[in-house]
Image: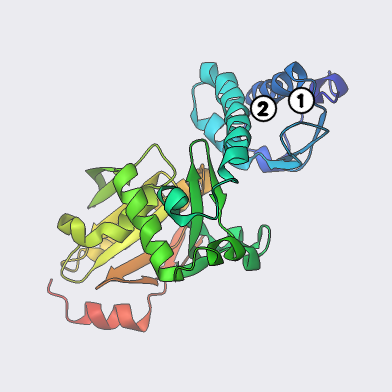
Amino acid sequence: MFSFFKRQKNEIIVPEWASFFSKSEYKVFVDAIDKFFYDRNITYTLGDALINVGPNDFDWGVLGLMNLAQACKLAEVSDRQELVLGHFESMIRTFQFEKDFKEIIDDFNAIEEYIATRLYPLDYLDHGGKENKVYRMLAGEIAEVLVFDLPDAVQTITPEQAGKWKKTWDKLFETGIENIRSKYPCSITREEIGQTSIWFAFGDHFFAPNIIFDMTRNPQLVGSKGSLIGIPHRHTVIIYPIENIDFVNAVNDMIPVIYGMNQEGPGSVSSNLLWYKDGIFENQPYEIEDNTIKFSPTDGFLKAMEIIES
């Protein structure tokens, strides 16, 4: 049995990947992990933002820690142990559910309700290989990925599995979008950020970003020249409808918020600033250097803004 603190009694060293934790916070986090695995007599070693799990009954090998750590950072200190334990308990429930799910997985009518479309950062596609995912690019570094939305987990659908259902990819993505629409509503509020009034869509689930598929269903989110959109992480979308020259202030006010929330997580999606117009999403590049924003909009965006009324 490996215990981080048995090996480092004199000093707690917070690894670089978890630098958002203080030493005491990191100790609470790793103590909670240690308790879960110790209570179940499962050996493990801590790696760089991951756990290598020893022999177990749940087919666990290497488990990522970043999203769990980010969630703990945002939670109250008194809730963090329960959050960690709940995370791994949900993985056990998922394992047990999947054993039964595998019996019906080839029957589209039986599993249709579990199909979902979820937005991910581009680098997610490299985990396990792009060839093992059904995806299409939205804009910038954001991908739409076909997944199973199971009771306690989200699981990627492979092309091999999807092919057994004899449905087009477009049909499956639309099924996934509709399923999420009916299951996971978002709260939409308007807030003042700097000089700008901006819409925020929130959800305590993993699918808040899917609000972007419902822009026409929420006309208040779309201006005559489209909308500026940020999807920093899985729980929040930031939207500014473009009507006049005030969009310049919106760009300067939105970018730091999008960037900061994306860095904070949990479930980071993208720091991109998107322009939505007539069903099309387009990335609008920017850089932040020395606390200065360098905005480099596309030709299409500039052309649309040229005729905007002040």
Check the picture and name the quadrant holding the C terminus.
bottom left
For the residues marked 1 and 2, what is the alpha-carbon distance in whole angstroms? 8 Å
Q: Are marks 1 and 2 in contact (CB under 8 Å)?
A: yes
Note whether 151 is above or below 229 in the view shown. Answer: above
Q: Amino acid at mark 2?
A: Tyr
Q: Mark 1 — residue? A: 12
Nearest to the observer: residue 166 or residue 207: 166
Element at label 2: helix
Residue 253 visible to an observer of this rendering: no
Q: Quadrant of residue 27?
A: top right
Figure quadrant of residue 173: bottom left
Q: Is 116 displayed left or right of 308 in the figure?
A: right
According to the picture, the residue beneath numbered tag 2 turns out to be 26
Residue at 43% from the left image edge and 63% from the top image edge: 172
Q: Residue at x 70, y 20 (%)?
A: 31
Task: Identify whether 184 is placed above or below 256.
Answer: above
Residue 240 appears in the picture as rendered:
yes
